[in-house]
């Protein structure tokens, strides 16, 4: 099997590391060679965070170069647009429609870019955009955006939901499992 490349992008504190661990566990349980690389950036200060997940029969390096990502999973619209050059021509973006103002917007030196989904589509990207924050809040916590995104991403994998649930159980503390199961289901079933 050819190596599949997934980039998980967001802003510090959004839960991208938990999402990458869940995905890594899932893929390992399916017998793939999996490499996960966490690039923190300015995660402590709300800066850009990128995690690479690569899997296949044999994966040599954890790094994804420009034009190699099969999937970009994004917690925030501007981050999806920022990493667009890493997407393969036939790649898929799965993104939350949430907008987190970067520092230039906060300080008034710039405006948040408008119509990002339309601009990414105009650039040729397949974009699956979903209000993951609203669905996470519906599940019981705004912090569950990452699991809503994993539910949405599950559409693009030919793996039974039970496998995703086992990876979820192994990745989330027991006291938060019901909430995260709801978040996953809402992401998976959203129209």
Image (spheres, helix red, strand yellow):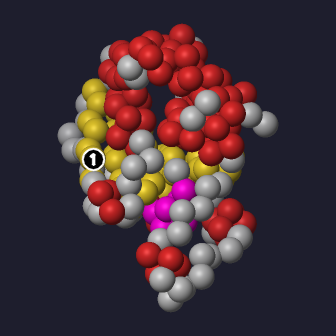
Q: Is residue 180 above or below residue 69?
A: above
Q: Taking the image as drawn, is residue 82 in sight?
A: yes
By secondary structure, the bulk of the magenta-drawn segment is best described as: helix
Residue at the disc numbered 1 = 38
Where, by quadrant of the figure, is residue 117 drawn? bottom right
Range of the magenta residues? 76-84
Residue at horizontal 56 percent and vertical 23 percent from the top? 179
Taking the view exactly as shown, the residue that stands out farthest to the left is 60
Q: Is residue 41 above or below residue 139?
A: below
Query: Is residue 161 covered in magenta?
Result: no
Q: Can you give x and y, in whole percent of width and height, for residue 141 in the image?
A: 57, 35
Position of the N terminus by quadrant: top left
Q: Can you give x and y, in whole percent of width and height, for residue 53 in the image?
A: 35, 40
Q: Can you give x and y, in whole percent of width and height, for residue 171 in the image?
A: 37, 23
Residue at horizontal 65 percent and vertical 55 percent from the top? 97
Residue at horizontal 52 percent and vertical 79 percent from the top? 105
Relative to residue 109, is residue 39 drawn left or right? left
Q: Is residue 11 above or below residue 139?
A: below
Q: Can you give x and y, in whole percent of width and height, for residue 177 in the image?
A: 49, 18
Q: Taking the image as drawn, is residue 57 in sight?
A: no
């Amino acid at each position: 099997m050819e190596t599949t490349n997934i980039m998980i992008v967001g802003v510090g504190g959004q839960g991208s590391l938990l999402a990458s661990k869940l995905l890594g566990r899932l893929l390992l349980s399916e017998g793939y060679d999996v490499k996960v690389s966490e690039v923190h950036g300015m995660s402590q200060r709300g800066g850009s965070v990128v995690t690479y997940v690569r899997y296949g029969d044999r994966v040599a390096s954890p790094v994804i170069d420009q034009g190699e990502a099969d999937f970009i999973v994004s917690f925030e619209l501007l981050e999806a647009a920022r990493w667009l050059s890493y997407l393969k021509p036939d790649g898929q973006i799965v993104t939350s429609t949430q907008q987190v103002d970067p520092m230039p917007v906060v300080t008034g030196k710039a405006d948040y870019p408008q119509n990002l989904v339309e601009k990414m589509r105009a650039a040729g990207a397949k974009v699956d955009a979903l209000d993951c924050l609203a669905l996470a809040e519906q599940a019981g916590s705004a912090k569950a955006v990452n699991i809503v995104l994993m539910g949405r991403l599950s559409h693009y994998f030919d793996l039974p939901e039970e496998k995703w649930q086992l990876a979820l159980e192994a990745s989330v503390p027991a006291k938060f499992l019901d909430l995260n199961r709801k978040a996953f289901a809402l992401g998976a079933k959203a129209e």
